[in-house]
Image (cartoon, helix red, strand yellow):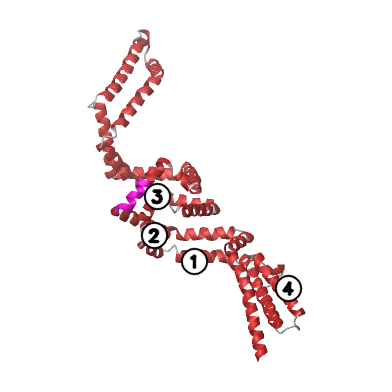
Amino acid sequence: MRIIATALLLAMAGLFVVSRHFLGLHPAWGYVRAFSEAAMVGGLADWFAVTALFRRPLGLPIPHTAIIPENKDRIADTMAVFLQENFLTPQVVARRLSGMNAAAAAGAFLSDPQGGEGRLREGAANLFADVLESLDQEKLGGIAKNALRTQLEKWQVSPLLGNLLGAAIADGRHMPVIEALIRRAAMTLEDNEDVIRAMIHDRANTLLRWTKLDERLANAILDGLYKLLAETVVVPDHPLRRRIEDGLEQLAHDLVHDPQMRDRVERMKVEILANPAFGQWLDALWERGRTRLLAMVREPEGVLAGQLGDSLAELGRALETDKRLQILVNRFARRTLVGVSSRYGTQIVRLVSETVRRWDARTVTDRIEGAVGRDLQFIRVNGTLVGGLVGVAIHTVDIWL
């Protein structure tokens, strides 16, 4: 479009030269000259206006030119304020989501992943991937990790663990775990039998060693332990098994109802969250998640293939048909997005602003010009043609008056 607009301007200049040469041959050439002359003025004026947005015309230091590169930081701040005031306020988010059935839309998408939305899904996935890659990964990861850490700090771990353990005991799901632990204890005892025998021999007195009773004592102890563990696994009502179950039931009760136990678990949680190893684990978790997410959005069709695709399709059909499920999902989506906009709206727009600020002026200019440059070149074309028509009108009025 830049070539077309420039070629049209040059054509008007050539037409102006030709019309001047033949001006005396016929009055019509006066109209041609007026058209071409005014068209050159209009085309040059619009060329200057369009060029001044992105760079200095002809490299001259003319005031109020190269507007976008010179005001890059102000544009970033204005963009951030615009996003926050028009998109990321809780009121706006709640109003936009109030009439939206996100659950049904998600269900329709999941139940027919190969439908007509394929191109839209692919374009949206690539756009999301480009945005995710262009943002500051350190700051974006910091927001995600801080949000996760904040939620974990607010999370009451003890009642959750107690309820999970109580439910597992009520359903009998703890028995395989107990049996596996007992078998593991037996295997550990067998692997360390020589160590146990050596400990018994070392602690036996001289008389026992002289009479070889220490060996019999070691055999008796080991046989008793093996028998105890074997009976605990085989006999359902074995006293040791019962004591383990009673201990687990008491632990589940204390986790939910005992303030001291809850405080102890809470202190352990705080210590874990403050441990540098947990921070390293969060870093690795974020990087793996970001890499996986990029791979997924770059190949949306691959994600929806195979067993995962079948499961998602089944979920989609449930979301489309189950009204109660739709109400629950839509309510959760509204609350979640409103909460995100309320808590992290400022951080999100600051992330956008700082990302644009870090771009160099050439990058900002190229991206904006690439997005709207075609329409701006149409302005040059229109300015050339409209200027010519205005020139003809002025010439006509000048002749008849």
Which kind of residue does numbered mark 4 sit on?
Answer: Gly
At numbered mark 4, what does the secondary structure look like: helix, strand or loop? helix
Could you say which quadrant of the image residue 38 lies in?
bottom right
Looking at this view, name the residue that lies furthest to the right: 21
Residue 137: x and y in percent read 53, 51
Q: Nearer the viewer, residue 82 or 128?
A: 128
Cα distance in 3D space between marks 2 and 4: 61 Å
Q: Is residue 79 above or below residue 260?
A: below
Name which of mark 4 and mark 3 comes first in the sequence: 4
Give the residue number, with chain letter if any, for mark 3: 112
Name the front one of labels 2 and 3. Answer: 3
Apparent side of residue 49 relative to residue 147 in the rendered image (left or right)? right
At numbered mark 3, what does the secondary structure look like: helix, strand or loop? loop
Give the residue number, with chain letter if any, for mark 4: 14
Q: Nearer the viewer, residue 124 or 201?
A: 124
Q: Nearer the viewer, residue 337 or 24?
A: 24
At numbered mark 1, what does the secondary structure look like: helix, strand or loop? helix
Name which of mark 1 and mark 3 comes first in the sequence: 1
Looking at this view, name the residue that lies furthest to the left: 237
Which kind of residue does numbered mark 1 sit on?
Answer: Phe
Residue 64: x and y in percent read 64, 72
The span shown in magenta is: 313-322
Looking at this view, name the residue that lies furthest to the top: 211
At numbered mark 2, what does the secondary structure look like: helix, strand or loop? helix
Residue 249: x and y in percent read 26, 37
Name which of mark 2 and mark 4 comes first in the sequence: 4
